[in-house]
Image (spheres, rainbow, N blue to C red):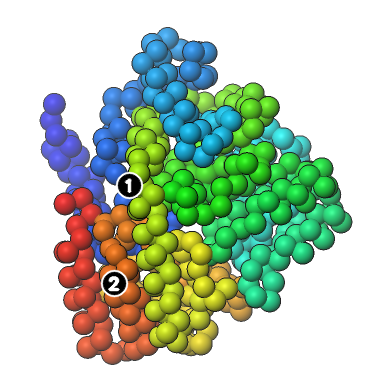
Amino acid sequence: HEPLNRIDPAIWDVIQREARRQEAHIELIASENHAHPAVMAAVGSVLTNKYAEGYPGRRYYGGCAVVDEAENLAIERLKTLFGAEAANVQPHAGSQANQAVFFAMLNPGDTILGMRLDEGGHLTHGMPLNISGKWFNVVSYGLNEQEEIDYDEMERVARETRPKLIIAGASAYALRIDFERFARVAKEVGAWFMVDMAHYAGLIAGGGYPNPVPHADFVTTTTHKGLRGPRGGAILMKAEHERAINSAIFPGIQGGPLMHVIAGKAVAFGLALEPAFRVYQQQILDNARAMADTLIRRGLRIVSGRTESHLMLVDLRGQGLTGQEAERLLEDVGLTCNKNTVPRDPQKATVSSGIRLGTPAITTRGFGVEDAVRVAHAIADRLAAPADTQVRERVRAEVEALCRRFPVYG
Ligand code: PLP
């Protein structure tokens, strides 16, 4: 067969340039990672050709015996990794994992309680333009004065509104979440309890963050963040919910599962079960703490004052910079991150007053604490002197040197 570069030079070129971009930039987006090459091999395999509507042993297509093995491996490994009773590995992404829980357990008009988007929640937890916000009556909780989850507010709102579903989990919250307390409240008010652990899944698998599985009816996740798997989603649940959730995914909201992606998930879960994964996750935590401490020492404000996870939010109001400006200044020197609202942000979300930084990707390429500290100084230097071209060139050179020292894919 003709190779891709001859069949489609334009797309070949895109892939080459994106590979170079990833090698030459330091990736600080908290939701991104560099997937393991073995994961990418599975995703790029012939399994992409196979239709397999249904579940292992119960398919609506012939010829599924082989891919059934891949799905069973993914399910078993995922259950072992988190100590779950049942698992569904078919969600195409994190959003579909959440939708499946909604579709299985709720009716339009029901009340759901989630974390406010502008204080750290995710758009699938009730944002007005998302299906969760359009179909359900959304009530929410946020952060208290210390910028920690306001558990008292969550309890009060839960008691007042008696939601059918309570959601814990966030996209921009740096601290540990008290899943036990959420579970107690859910039980008290008669709500189902769902944890969206997308951001924390890798840390949880590595033992570095509380495991919500013993406490929640449903735990949803993405597989492409800290878990280093392919882009995708998964659902863990109590055995009693397996039938309802499986039916909500197929035929409820999806058709044929992506068997090549499911094989990639199985590879990632297998790698996450190895002892080295715990070391990797601990390094992610160490790197994040070192970055946050350094940024604080350099005069930057970290939301909540610290991190207990892989991410941190930097509030740039003291620097007179918007998140949008900071994202551009850093991109310009090879540091990739995303602008993010901070609690009670005066700016709209497209501008925002903060940036979100995460350490999974840099840790994957081998950065240790010293390197994370260097990155934090590079950020602080650049943001302290936006117009200084000498600083810009020096930081750029430092970023280049770090990238050369730690190739992503060799
Ligand atoms: N849930 C949380 C907490 C997330 O942070 C994300 C993605 O950023 C998602 C769900 C959605 O995942 P996906 O983008 O795969 O739909």
Q: Residue furthest right?
A: 160
Q: Nearer the viewer, residue 365 or 105?
A: 365
Q: Is residue 295 visible?
A: yes
Residue 124: give x, y in percent of width and height. Answer: 61, 50
Residue position marked by numbered label 2 in the rendering: 370
Q: Residue furthest front?
A: 275
Q: Depth check: 267 or 120 in front?
A: 267
Task: Identify the residue at horizontal 33%, vertical 25% (top origin).
Answer: 47
Q: Which badge, 2 or 1, is on the more N-terminal residue?
A: 1
**Three-letter code for the amino acid on which mark 2 is drawn:** Glu
Distance between the alpha carbons at the discs numbered 2 and 1 = 20 Å
Query: What residue is shown at x 25% (from left), y 42% (from top)?
Result: 37
Determine whether, in the image, residue 386 is placed left or right of residue 303. left
Mark 1 — residue?
A: 276
Q: Residue at x 56, y 35 (%)?
A: 84
* Quarter holding residue 325: bottom left
Tell me the SS state at disc 1. Answer: helix
Please tell me which residue lies in front, 208 or 404.
208
The residue positioned 37% from the left and 87% from the top of the image is 384
1 relative position to 273: left or right: left
Q: Is residue 13 left or right of residue 223?
A: left
